[in-house]
Amino acid sequence: MRGIRLGSIFGIPIKLNVTFLLILPLLAYLIGSDVGTLVDQVLNPAFGAGIEAAALTGGSTPFVLGAVAAVGLFTCVLLHELGHSVVAMYYGYEIDSITLWLLGGVAQFTEMPEDWKIELQVAIAGPIVSVALGALSYAGFTLLAGGGQPVITFVLGYLMLANVVLAAFNMLPGFPMDGGRVLRALLARTRTHARATQLAAEVGKGFALLLALFALFTGLNLYLLALAFFIYMGAAGEAQQTVLKAAFRGVTVADVMTGDGLHTVAPEDSVADLIQRMFRERHTGYPVVDRGELVGMVTLGDAQSVDDVERDAMRVDDVMTTDVYTVTPETDAMDAFQTMQQNNVGRLPVVDADGELCGIVSRTDLMTAFDIIQQSGAASGESLGPNLSPFGR
């Protein structure tokens, strides 16, 4: 998830996604509009706050309070994500970043723990931080209640309630939320990580559908609908990634790449000849090689960007991409797949230790290999292991 970098905490980059800049003023407005209700119907009767609602509802005061409370809430969300991250770092896992966005916060790990004990601790750390923040807010709220500090008392009361709700909601079994990850960890005690992920993902998708129905039948709550969509897509995506990772365990790029009979083009070839060759050979992308050296990649999209009348005059080196991502024959197949996803490319040149082109691996190659592995006995999502993979050595 991309965002504007603000700085770092414990070496973890902290980012703001553009959607955060949209939700923050909206959240501030919603809190400010509800100040009187929160005081009269929640904080005073349930907790004895002793706040005079009139002191907080005049002029611009409610919206200043809303802004302070919204910033405080997102600060608590950041601390929640830091809770996950610090525990993961303790066990040696690297955190790519923490990003605040439309639906709260996301800690992006370079690799998720597969040991169920570690995942359980990482998953539960965030809600524990939220409960601790709620307890601290409650302590401050109790000390100030009825003491003539209505503004601070209100903010602490709001954060007290918000952190408890945040912890409770995150512990619902909506994988990949915290509760869903706790569920996966518990399921992984007696199952493989891949199978536990599949089961937790099915529960998460069911939870997302229920949440969407609730949002529809309680006044079309767009925020809950967006959250339901995020949970559903997150569960499906992580389940797919985990099954792929299990299937490709022990499989390298050398096992699946196209090496013999590799088709390449030269920089001086015309775009018209390139398109004819693509039609004839049924390929949509080629490495561009100049005197044995890889100098770029050219795709059907690159060729089609040239007008018909100019294709005879334009050369491959006029349209090719020179910023090329490469892999080696020893690269894990899953790492190659993730490189393609992250950089939105459909194929990667394979270079050997001497930097010479020795093959090409495409999404099609990887998906064909995955289908073969699945059909050979991993359809349930169980890990094959290096010796059982039909591609392993």
Image: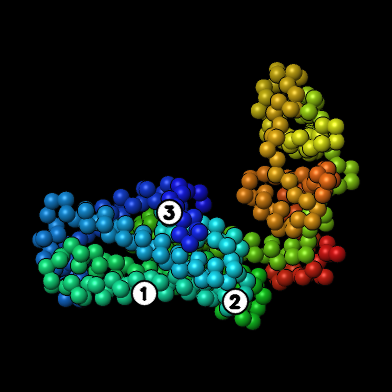
Q: Amino acid at mark 1?
A: Ala
Residue shown at 85% from the left, 36% from the top: 292
At which x and y percent is residue 301?
68, 34
Rendered position, 4 above or below 151:
above
Q: Amino acid at mark 3?
A: Trp
Q: Which numbered disc, 1 or 2, marks the residue closer to the eye? A: 1
Along the polypeptide, which appears first: circle 1 or circle 2?
A: 2
Q: Secondary structure at mark 3?
A: strand
| Crowding at mark 1 (Cα within 10 Å: few <14, some 14-19, many 20+) | some
Q: Which mark is residue 132?
A: 1
Residue beneath disc 3? 101
Residue 360 seen in this snapshot: no
The colour scheme used to paint the residues is rainbow
Q: Which numbered disc, 1 or 3, marks the residue closer to the eye? A: 1
Residue 325 seen in this snapshot: yes
Taking the view exactly as shown, the residue that stands out farthest to the bottom is: 190
Residue 333 falls left or right of residue 70: right
